[in-house]
Image (cartoon, rainbow, N blue to C red):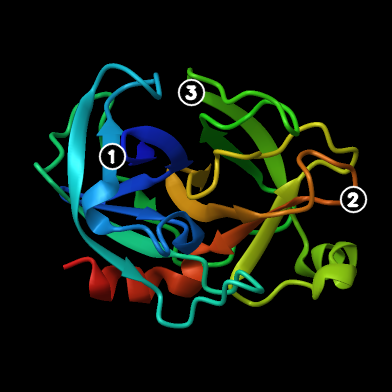
Amino acid sequence: VSLRHSGSHVCGASIISSNWVVTAAHCVVGVSVSSISVRSGSTYSNSGGTIHSATKVTVHGSYNSDTQDYDVAIVQVSPAFTTSSSEQSIALESSTVSVGTNVVVSGWGTTSEDGSPSTTLRQVTVQIISDSVCNTDYSAYGGITARMICAGTSSGGKDACQGDSGGPLVANSRLVGIVSWGVGCARANYPGVYTKVSAVRSWILNNAT
């Protein structure tokens, strides 16, 4: 779904129950609840589907805006979602996904660095990168934490980009990651970094009530 500030698309999010979505903390920190809404049930970021207003936003208490550790937040919306072919909740991955697994990232973000956002939902298949390789790739940026998982291609060319933050990384119909950060977009040796859903799953389930 499209997460919006004052009616404009800023981030992605994923439906996890009839009235909750999960997104990245950096998408909602410092933004008033009353200005946040969600568009669901449409492949277009600016038309179609239904608009749901945020009624509550909960950011992970350990979120660190400098390192992007624990980059996860949940948003309660009204009215509730109606389950349909274009609008359904996703299960949260509970275990570690093995290196090399094909995963799909989707969103309405830019299709190149400094490019224009896409008005139509797009997706790309990437692979899970090992923590050790990713940690080395990002050593100059402080590395990654146990709440992060990386995905990309060895040569680059496929990745999430600006405007995709908060959106889903999916494998086997389960939410594996939440688009969080990276250096540039689709650069070789800089895979996308995602919040590792299995590491924050219990927090999500305990708070989305």
- Looking at the rendered image, the disc whose residue lies closer to the viewer, 2 or 1, is 1
**What is the distance, in whole Å, between disc 2 and disc 3 at their CAs?**
26 Å
In the rendered image, residue 185, in percent from the top left (x then y), is placed at 76, 40
Q: What residue type is labelled 1?
A: Val
Q: In which quarter of the image is the C terminus?
A: bottom left
Which circle's residue, 2 or 3, is located before the other in the chain?
3
Residue 97, which numbered label?
none
**What is the distance, in whole Å, between disc 2 and disc 1 at their CAs?**
33 Å
Q: In which quarter of the image is the N terminus?
A: top left
In the rendered image, residue 114, in percent from the top left (x then y), is placed at 73, 32
Residue appearing at x 28%, y 69% in the figure: 205
- Seen from the viewer's position, the closer of residues 34 and 140 is 34
Q: What residue sits right under mark 1 in the picture?
A: 38
Residue 40 falls in which quadrant of the image?
A: top left
**What is the distance, in whole Å, between disc 1 and disc 3 at their CAs?**
15 Å
Residue appearing at x 29%, y 58% in the figure: 32
Residue 80 falls in which quadrant of the image?
A: top left
Residue 41 left/right relative to 101? left
Residue 189, which numbered label?
2
Residue 104 falls in which quadrant of the image?
A: top right
User: In the orientation shown, which residue stands out farthest toward the bottom?
Assistant: 62
- Looking at the rendered image, the disc whose residue lies closer to the viewer, 1 or 3, is 1
State the SS at label 3. Answer: loop
- Seen from the viewer's position, the closer of residues 21 and 17 is 21
Q: What residue type is labelled 2?
A: Asn
State the SS at label 2. Answer: loop
Binning the other alpha carbons within 10 Å of mark 3 as few (below 14), some (14 to 19) or many (20 upward) gives some
Image height of 88 relative to 30, above or below:
above
Q: What residue sits right under mark 3 in the picture?
A: 121
Which circle's residue, 1 or 3, is located before the other in the chain?
1
